[in-house]
Each structure stands twice: as C-alpha cells, then as structure tokens.
C-alpha cells in the first residue's frame, strides 16, 4: 500500500466532540495534528450532534466534579478564542427521595469539592421556582449554581475550527480500518478504508460507539462498551407559560433520580418546547441502527404531569431526536493507553456513557497530555483504566448503587 499524505505528531481518529477537542489541544500546543472522521463532519450518527447537553457539577462520584469545574473554565476559554458562545448558564436541580443513596452521595461530593448547594423540601422548592416544580412530599431537591446548557453541534464545530486555525489537518469520510506499529522507527501507521496511510508519532482513538470494534481490531482487547440508542424528547409548554421555562431566567437544568432516571433542560433550541428525556436506551449495532422506537413514554408522561403541575403538555412529545450512548458497565469513562505492542503510542478515550459531553474540554486536554507527555497533569485516572474490567467485569464498585 502506498504511503499518502504527510507525517504527523498526533493522529486523532474520530471527530466527535472528544476527538475534536483533543485535536484542538494538540494543535494549539504546536503539534502537527491530523483529525480523521469516518463520516461527514458534524454528522448525526453518533453521540456529538443535536441542540443541547446539560452541564452540571453534581456527581455522586466525587472524581468527576473537579473535571466539570475545569471544563467550565476551558469552555469559556475556547469561546473567547472563537468569538461566540456554546455554553448558556443555568442553575442545576437534582431531586430524589430524601434518603436516596445517589442524592446523598451527590451532597457528600459537593461538600468534598467545595461546591455550594442548598437542600430544599417540597415547599421550599415550590417557592424557589415559583410553583413550576412540584416534587413528591417525601422527596428533596439539591440546587447548585453549576448547571447550564451546551450547544453540541456548535461546540464540535468550534473545536474543529480552532484546531484548523492552529494548523491541524481535518479529513472526513475517512474510515480508519487499522493502526499498526512501525517496528523500524517507532510511531504508528493509520490506514483507512480508501487505502490511504498516515504515519504519526502518537495516535488518539475517540470513536464513540465504534470504540469496541476498533479497539478489538487494533489491539485485540475486548472492551465492555455497549452502544445504546437513546431518544431525546421535546414537550410543549402550555401557552402563556413559555417564558417561565426559558433559558436565561431562573429555571434550571435538572435531573430526577427515580425509576427511570429523567433529565432535562430549559427551553432554548425550540422556543415553547422543553427537553425532558430518560437517561438510557436500547443496545444496538452502530452500523445497523434500528432508528427507533425509543424509550417507553408512559413514565415520562406521568413524571411531566406531576412535576410541572399540568403547565407542560404531557400528552406526548412534539419532537424527538435519536442519539447514541457508549455505555460501560459502571458508566465510568475509559481513558487509557492501549498498551501491548503500542505501549504509550496509542491512547483510547471512550465509554462516555451518556454523560461525557460536558467534560469534553478537559477530556481533550487529558488525552492530549497522555499522547504528548505520557501522563495527565493533576488528574487521577485510576477510575478510567481499561484493566478494571479484567479485575471486575462490573468495573468500579459504587456504594450508592
């Protein structure tokens, strides 16, 4: 196979938000960077498209909160470089039964990470949000200022534009079929389905729902990252109440830790509609998507009717969008070296489990650190090791589950 193209310091495979953020980071540091995408840039077949993602610092796992807090700063830094906004501020509301282990762990994590919060009962929450949120009598809410909405497609475009401005080479419709070690001079060869080959000192693999397939092909490692198809639902706010639920006011991004786990964002992308959806989905092959039918609607309808006091029409969503999750058994990320014959020359970032988008700026920073220096400054990565699944197929043990 003929060699084509230049040689690079870093080749990033996969141009969703994680890969695009990584390419921005490496290019900004003066590294000759190639970003490859198997489909069109900004496609809708993975996990990085759409109109909104929640950003929140409230995590029961205390190791995520510092990553989110750093990401807030990195989002704002990237915005200042590009000249437009992708982050829109809001408070965050988490709610559950008063004795729910998940919510109690969130409170403890906030304390540990010095995140200010308020715990409110039903009446206090009703007053805080002027009657717009009505939790059950035996529930409580945790309110923090660290919430908000990220515009995902716009954010991916931002990182790609900044990478390009910093000298990166971007190529789409380039499906990577293999990564091989160069046994003569080190580094790796990345080969595509079109027969093109590129040499890089280092390679970062960020291919979302395709991670399991590519990592098995390249490294022979079986990663338990399960692609899920999930459905995002938009519901109509009844006439006269639209402004009360709009971004920019005091209505929060929110998460409800019942069964099912429900989340949502203020009205932003579609005026008069509010996003409320279930965290989860159905297993699928990312190359043979079912494109539906989506999560059951009955629990969502019941939740909306009770929580929003009839002000949001619970008859059914007026718009839906499909998206992909890449779920690990413990819903923790995979950020690690591929190892084996590749040593530290190939870095893998995957398994973001439906909650990684908000942290994409810091994940890009970490992946760039690992590729360029062999370590990630100021971050404890033991929770994200690939080897944890060999030690325990369920991954990291969690007291609150």
Image: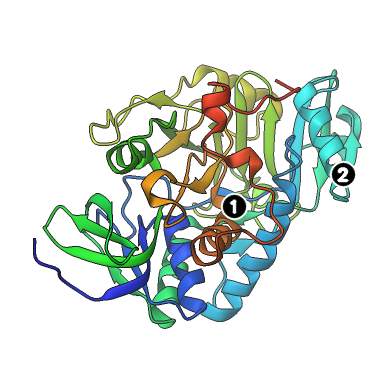
Which of the marked residues, 2 or 1, is nearer the chain's N terminus? Answer: 2
Q: Residue at x 66, y 47 (%)?
A: 245
Quadrant of image for the C terminus: top right
Mark 2 lies on a secondary structure that is helix
Residue 329 vertical placement versus 156 (above, below): above
The Cα–Cα distance between marks 2 and 1, rounded to whole angstroms, is 20 Å
Q: Residue at x 85, y 22 (%)?
A: 98
Mark 1 lies on a secondary structure that is helix
User: Camera-side residue: 9 or 273?
Assistant: 9
x and y percentages locating residue 121 in the rendered image: 89, 29
- Where on the picture, by quarter, is residue 325? top left
x and y percentages locating residue 89 in the rendered image: 69, 59
Q: Are marks 2 and 1 in contact (CB under 8 Å)?
A: no
Residue 228 vertical placement versus 160 (above, below): above
- Residue that mark 1 sits on: 358
x and y percentages locating residue 83 in the rendered image: 54, 80
Dot 1 alpha-carbon crowd within 10 angstroms: few under 14, some 14 to 19, many 20 or more: many
- Residue that mark 2 sits on: 112
User: Camera-side residue: 237 or 147?
Assistant: 147
Please, which residue is most extreme toward the left here?
A: 1
Is 34 situated left or right of 97 in this image? left
Dot 2 alpha-carbon crowd within 10 angstroms: few under 14, some 14 to 19, many 20 or more: few
Q: Is residue 134 visible?
A: no
Q: Is residue 334 visible?
A: yes
Q: Nearer the viewer, mark 2 or mark 1?
A: 2
Residue 46 vertical placement versus 104 (above, below): below
> Where residue 292 is drawn, which disc sits there?
none
x and y percentages locating residue 336 in the rendered image: 52, 47
User: Camera-side residue: 185 or 69?
Assistant: 185
């Amino acid at each position: 196979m003929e060699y084509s193209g230049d040689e690079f310091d870093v080749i990033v495979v996969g141009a969703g938000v994680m890969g695009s953020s990584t390419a921005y980071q490496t290019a900004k540091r003066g590294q000759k960077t190639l970003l490859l995408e198997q489909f069109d840039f900004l496609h809708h077949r993975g996990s990085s498209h759409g109109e909104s993602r929640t950003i929140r610092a409230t995590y029961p796992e205390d190791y995520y909160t510092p990553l989110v807090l750093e990401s807030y700063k990195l989002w704002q830094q990237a915005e200042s470089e590009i000249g437009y906004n992708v982050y829109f501020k809001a408070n965050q509301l988490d709610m559950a039964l008063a004795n729910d282990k998940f919510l109690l762990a969130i409170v403890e994590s906030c304390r540990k990470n010095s995140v200010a919060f308020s715990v409110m009962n039903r009446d206090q929450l009703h007053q805080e949000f002027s009657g717009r949120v009505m939790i059950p009598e035996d529930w409580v809410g945790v309110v923090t200022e660290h919430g908000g909405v990220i515009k995902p497609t716009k954010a991916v475009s931002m990182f790609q534009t900044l990478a390009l401005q910093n000298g990166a080479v971007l190529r789409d419709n380039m499906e990577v079929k293999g990564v091989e070690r160069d046994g003569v001079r080190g580094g790796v060869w990345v080969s595509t389905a079109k027969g093109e080959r590129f040499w890089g000192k280092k390679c970062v693999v960020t291919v979302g729902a395709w991670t399991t397939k590519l990592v098995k092909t390249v490294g022979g490692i079986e990663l338990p990252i399960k692609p899920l198809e999930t459905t995002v639902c938009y519901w109509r706010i009844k006439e006269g109440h639209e402004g009360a639920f709009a971004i920019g006011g005091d209505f929060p991004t929110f998460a409800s830790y019942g069964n099912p786990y429900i989340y949502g964002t203020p009205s932003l992308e579609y005026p008069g509609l509010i996003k409320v959806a279930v965290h989860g989905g159905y297993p699928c092959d990312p190359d043979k998507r079912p494109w539906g039918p989506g999560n059951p609607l009955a629990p969502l309808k019941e939740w909306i009717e009770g929580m929003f006091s009839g002000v949001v029409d619970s008859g059914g969503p007026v718009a839906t969008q499909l998206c992909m999750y890449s779920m690990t058994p413990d819903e923790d990320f995979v950020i690690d070296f591929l190892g084996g014959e590749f040593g530290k020359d190939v870095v893998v970032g995957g398994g973001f489990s439906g909650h990684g988008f908000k942290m994409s700026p810091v994940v890009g920073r970490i992946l760039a650190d690992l590729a360029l220096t062999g370590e990630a400054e100021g971050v404890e990565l033991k929770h994200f090791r690939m080897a944890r699944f060999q030690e325990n197929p369920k991954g990291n043990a969690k007291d609150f589950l």
